[in-house]
Image: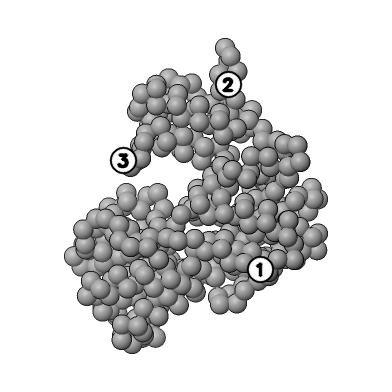
Amino acid sequence: MPRRRTVLESDGPKYRQVFERLSRDILAGKYKAGQKLPSEAALVRQFGTSRITVGRAVRELKERGLVERIAGSGTYVRERTIGEGGALFGLLIPDLGETEIFEPICQGMAGAPQATQHALLWGHTESTRATKEEQALKLCHQYVERNVSGVFFAPLELTPAKDETNQAIVKALEKARIPIVLLDRCIMPFPKRSKHDLVGIDNRRAGYLITEHLLKLGCRRIVFVAYSNGAATVEARVAGFREALFSYGFPLEADSVQRLASITEAELKRLLDSLRPEAFVCVNDRTAGRLMHTALGLGYQVPRDLRIVGIDDVEYAKLLPVPLTTIHQPCREIGQAAVAAMLDRIEQPEMLTRDILLDCSLIVRGSCGTQKGTMGTL
């Protein structure tokens, strides 16, 4: 079967897009250590670009230490080793491959200047029958057994046992005296705080900004939509949503925040018939994409009949049937900041716990009914 062609985005140099796509596949495990990459001719066909572009992308992969070239044989994925005086850090990201922000965060970690003399351990479990909670706990125990220097942990979400599992993982790492840096989300419900450093964005402000944008466009009946069993970031974004409504003098109705098990046509029709919303603020872009497809299936037009916005600005947000207005997370920069935070924590273990919250921006596209562009920063 011929390889499926990969569509590149229109933004940014093409060699950079090829580099980022290949590095993402390597870091996500699509290409394993020691595996040969497709030939440059095959990559030219895959990406629909020139040999010069592909060659430059592969050279950058080599400079970043992700691949090595063997004369007369080809290009191979390198096994990442620990340099002299370096440390081994574990990545514990149960939602990697499902939640789109984590792949670019991991790319940022691997490409951080401070990471060159250290190694990131991409743990894995053999069992495909184990639940996500069981797999996460097994990875945690693997890292404890290997006595890693620290663990980057993105707590579980969207599972009934997420809170118990997250607490068990943190307790096991604490008992082993392994430093933890939390990625994107806390293990405690908002606004409570754990005693571990966290790197992400200010989710309350993100919820405020995206809601304020709709209010400035004249929307009055706005509904916030999220899935059940979400992470602490959900409640923070809800808090920002409520604060924006309050700041603009609009009462918060009891049903203005909807936590759904799924977004089916029947469920969405119920919301539309009962609440008559003008716009939806979705907790993230995946939820917004699902809601948009469901609304279109019911015959509604976006943004004429409904305005829909999200948060995260994942890769496909601009590729939805109506390009999505959203909040852009600087994922690669989050990864770089996480590495710096971990090294600071190791050097200064008694340092006060920190929330390291990076700036993010409002990206305006067609789904809210205004012209495409970028507006403001948080």
Dot 1: few (<14), some (14–19), or many (≥20) neighbours within 10 Å? some
* Gap in angstroms between the C-alphas marked 2 and 1: 43 Å
Q: First in sequence: mark 3 or mark 2?
A: 3
Q: Nearer the viewer, mark 1 or mark 3?
A: 1
Q: Which quadrant of the view contains residue 372?
A: bottom left
For residue 360, above or below residue 15: below
Quick check: 325 left or right of 104?
left
**In the rendering, which numbered label is found on residue 353?**
1
Quadrant of the drawing holding the N terminus: top left
Q: First in sequence: mark 2 or mark 1?
A: 2
Q: Secondary structure at mark 2?
A: strand
Kind of residue at disc 2: Arg
For residue 363, above or below residue 31: below
Kind of residue at disc 1: Thr
Q: First in sequence: mark 1 or mark 3?
A: 3
Q: Which quadrant of the view contains residue 325?
A: bottom left
Q: Disc 3 designates what residue?
A: 10
Kind of residue at disc 3: Ser
Q: Residue at x 26, y 55 (%)?
A: 373
Q: Nearer the viewer, residue 92 or 200?
A: 200
Q: Disc 2 designates what residue?
A: 69
Q: Can residue 107 be seen here?
A: yes
Q: Residue at x 74, y 66 (%)?
A: 350
Q: Nearer the viewer, mark 2 or mark 1?
A: 1
* Gap in angstroms between the C-alphas marked 1 and 3: 41 Å
Dot 2: few (<14), some (14–19), or many (≥20) neighbours within 10 Å? some
Q: Residue at x 58, y 67 (%)?
A: 355
